Amino acid sequence: MPSTTTAHPTATITIGGTPSSTIDRRIYGHFLESAFFGNIEGGVLDEGSPRSIAEPGLLQGCRRDVIEACRELGLPVVRWPGGNFTSPYRWEDGTGPRDQRPRTLELAWGSEESNRFGTPEFLAWCREVGTEPYLAHSARSVDDAVRWVEYTNYGGDTTMTRRRAADGLSDPQDVRIWGIGNEVYGPWQMGHRPVEAYVHDAREHARFMRSVDPALRFVAVGDEHREWTREVAAELGDVVDWISLHLYGASRHLVDPSVAEYEAVVAQARYVEQAIADQSELIAATSTRHGERRPLGIAMDEWNIRHVEPAAWPAPQPGAGGGFAPREQPEVEIEDGAALRRVNRYSPRTLADALFYAGVFHAMHRASALEVPVTMANTVNLVNANGLLEVRPEGVVRAATFHVWDLYQSHTGPVHVPARVDGPSWTQSVRQGDDRRASGDFRTTPAVIGHLDASASRSADGSTAYLAVINRSATADVRARIVVPGGLPTQVSARTLGAGEADLFAVNTLEAPDRVSLSAPGDVRLEEGCHTFPAHSITVLSWTRA
């Protein structure tokens, strides 16, 4: 890599200060939802494809190239079967011989569920890719939940354990993480009920599920609305291990691929960080008042950025090379927020999205120092449906998202070190997720957005230091002086994503698979401790600590 220029620095990054904290690897987790835009069938499972496993067994029909990509990335944890799909799901329908399983009307997304990828296939797939399973139960029946735990984890000789063995899983599967319901606060869920009823039911679920396996860890349903989460923290804080938080950003670039829209996308990491801090403070304060001493964490087990478009446009269909197929897109009034209601589930992840994701990781890194940190997160989705991997008959596209995960999982450290940035900024009306006013316009809050955002970390043994820096500016390189206790070496290693790409909304395809991808490591020379961070890019610097 070329050396930095000798221009005067316009920013300062100061590393060190308050005590360090641990970044839980599960924040880099993932999510699969059955019956959802090719997550499973047409994604993980593609029976009849020459790219799928042909040999008999639980993995028969699973895409080999998807398994290989997941192994390449490394998946800490995967949540399944949803999502909204969870609330009406009957797990027993996904057991037994595949060809004898019932085909059912699926009520979350209005499709038909074949049940050909059920609990035994999911657990076998998790073992094959090397990830920890996280099973989400509907929380509508205690007995149903207990039998599911019995099927997966119990070591005795019962009808359920015999069924598990007949399904190809002879040994207990040791599934530790279980969700008790999904978004129960919403009327779109089967089993929707007031928080008072939910906490009563969730406590009963946890008690009897743990009677089968005392080692279970639970995720309770949280919400951005304070009244719901306060009650959950008060009544379940001594029972569960996580309280969930679902956050989604929104992008209008499909109708407005402008610099202003790019800035709106990357700025929304600020909204996510504030929502995490608010949730953490609320849970901590509630737990203190109720005398709870069980350590709690936030599970951000649904998050992503939605690409919204006019519902009047033809419905998107998957494109052969990734993304969505060409279609007529008549001009619309982009200021008409009410028209931009549909989420394009085939819209690929962009360079702007990549910087948003990096900002969210920085937010979770900093949140590791909070009293109630984020200790698990599961992005929606892993495969297809705006995911890290776009699966098509001719191959797999590693989206821009994939490389962001690779950068932070593989090239930063697990020990967070405080870092402060002083430098140029702009004022932005930050969207509060995909939350709308009655008019259809996004709710916004004004905030100052720094061009640079930094997250410092070190390896577990302390031998290597890392500095991840996002330059959110659409056009300007930013030269920064890096201040580190004990000083910096004159030469460090650097990896970048997005540097030199002209299109702020660039995407990867089968034809151009590496357009938004991670550079090979290269040595850069720091002159007087300074480095120039390219516009609209992510950079990770690393060096050996003295």
Image: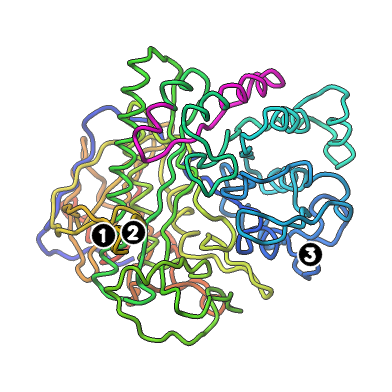
Q: In this view, does 15 lie to the left or right of 79?
A: left
Query: Mark 1 falls on what kind of element?
Result: strand
Residue 24 visible within the image: no
The stretch drawn in magenta includes residue 529: no
Q: Which amino acid does label 3 sit on?
A: Glu
How far apart are labels 2 and 1 at the CA level?
A: 6 Å
How far apart are labels 3 and 1 at the CA level?
A: 43 Å
Residue 461 visible within the image: yes
Q: What stretch is highlighted in magenta?
A: 202-231
**At which x and y percent is residue 268?**
30, 55
Residue picked out by circle 1: 471
Residue picked out by circle 2: 538
How many residues crowd around disc 2 within 10 Å: few (fewer than 14), some, or many (20 or more)?
many
Q: Which of 316 and 436 is in front in this view?
A: 436
Point out the image quarter for the N terminus. Answer: bottom left
Q: Do the residues labelled 2 and 1 touch (CB within 8 Å)?
A: yes
**At which x and y percent is residue 509?**
53, 75
Q: Which amino acid does label 2 sit on?
A: Ile
